[in-house]
Amino acid sequence: MKAFILSAVILSGLATHAQDTHFSQFYSTPLLVNPAMTGIFDGKMRVSNNYRSQWGGLGDAYKTIHVSLDMPVGKKRYKSNYFGVGLMVYQDNAGAAKFSHTIIEGSLAYTLSVDDGDNFLAVGFRGGLDSREVDFSRATWDSQWNGDVYDPTLPGESPQLQQRTYFDFTAGMMWYYIPDGYNTISAGGSMSHITKPDLSFYNQYTDPLNNRIAAHASAEISMDQFRSVWVMPKVLVQLQGNQKEILAGAFVKQKLQFKSRYTNFQRDIFFSYGAWYRFGDAFVLATRFDYHEWGFGFSYDLTTSDLASLHSSSGGPEITLSYVAGIKRGQRSKHLNKMPKFF
């Protein structure tokens, strides 16, 4: 019965207006949320890798992988105004028929200092080729029921169109304010699927992909004079067709310092913990460790909707690994701009 329900959910997604998948650790997928974030970070290069699994207790459920790379360009020459370039690769798949969605898109952004000081505006674009594919040879059909049991030796159906490739385009804007090196506030929005590409697997039907409108805001607020504790509220609102997602919560970030045994040089370690609520769906418990150039995050969704009754393991674990190539001390005056930390 559970396998039937899962199959019905997945197959219904092929016949209705498709919706985008989501990440609970949305703050670690900046290019996916808003291309205007491309290249905005304190460093030379940023790499983020996310893996999410959902509804694993119900069979071949969704497994999603996201990898992005971006970097600022022109900091030496243009000072506070500069470009950002990036590349994002994303894929999820699910079901016995291995329904998959693959994205390979590049992004370009431009950041402008509004008052030559603390306020910045950024505009960004992301575009590339996306594809959706299903392997009908793995599917089961009514014609393979012999009256008593399912017989895989009986012929099934062979639809001719099994893959859909299309061009997709996203645009976004963002504002951020950084009065010093310890506090930040940012807000922005984006629109995805501007051209409403047709996703139908069948030529005689159309299935336009609805625009996705995203709005986001975040802050990093220092709580003590020693700059060792921060509160980091974050919110994401996404609207697509008649679907909506509202995710809000906060991290508490603490700084720990370890001294080298021989040189007395200090390395900062940041430990963050917090929770989010996806309205009408789930609580998200999350934690994150940052050491030097590396970051590791883990979250788990605790489903609160009626779907939780389908299986005890109906939630979703998510893992994030990130790397930011730092700037050497002697070069910081040439590269450093005031940057929010979107991880």
Image: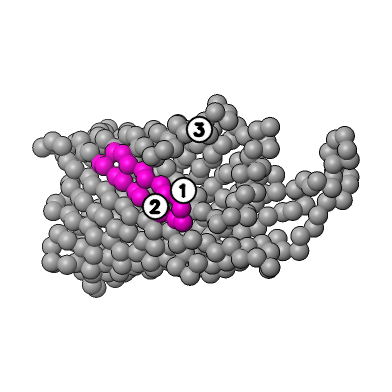
From the image, state whether disc 3 or disc 2 is nearer to you: 3
Horizontal placement of 187 versus 64: left or right? left
Q: Amino acid at mark 1?
A: His
Q: Between label 1 and label 3, give the one nearer the viewer.
A: 3
The CA distance from mark 1 to mark 3 is: 19 Å
Where does label 2 land, which residue?
238
Q: For mark 1, does the 10 Å Cα neighbourhood hold few (<14), some (14 to 19), or many (20 or more) residues? A: few
Depicted 298 relative to depicted 329: above or below = above
Residue 22 numbered mark, or none: 1
The residue indicated by pointer 3 is 306
Q: Which residues are magenta?
A: 232-250
**Element class at badge 2:** strand
Q: Residues within 10 Å of mark 3 (few under 14, many from 20)?
A: few
Q: Is residue 236 magenta?
A: yes
Q: Nearer the viewer, residue 260 or 14?
A: 14
Q: Residue at x 83, y 38 (%)?
A: 150
> If you read the primary sequence from the N terminus, does the residue marked by circle 1 or circle 3 appear first?
1
Q: Position of residue 333 (x, y in %)?
A: 19, 61
Residue drawn at x 35%, y 64% as measured from the top left = 172
Give x and y (percent) for residue 228: 19, 36
Disc 1 secondary structure class: loop
Q: Amino acid at mark 3?
A: Asp
Observer-nearest of 311 and 280: 280
Question: At label 2, which amino acid type do we have?
Answer: Gln
Closer to the chain start, of discs 2 and 1, is 1
For marks 3 and 2 on the same chain, the one whose residue lies earlier in the sequence? 2
Q: Nearer the viewer, residue 136 or 66?
A: 136
The percent coordinates of residue 52 (x first, y second) are 51, 42
Q: Quadrant of the N terminus?
A: top right
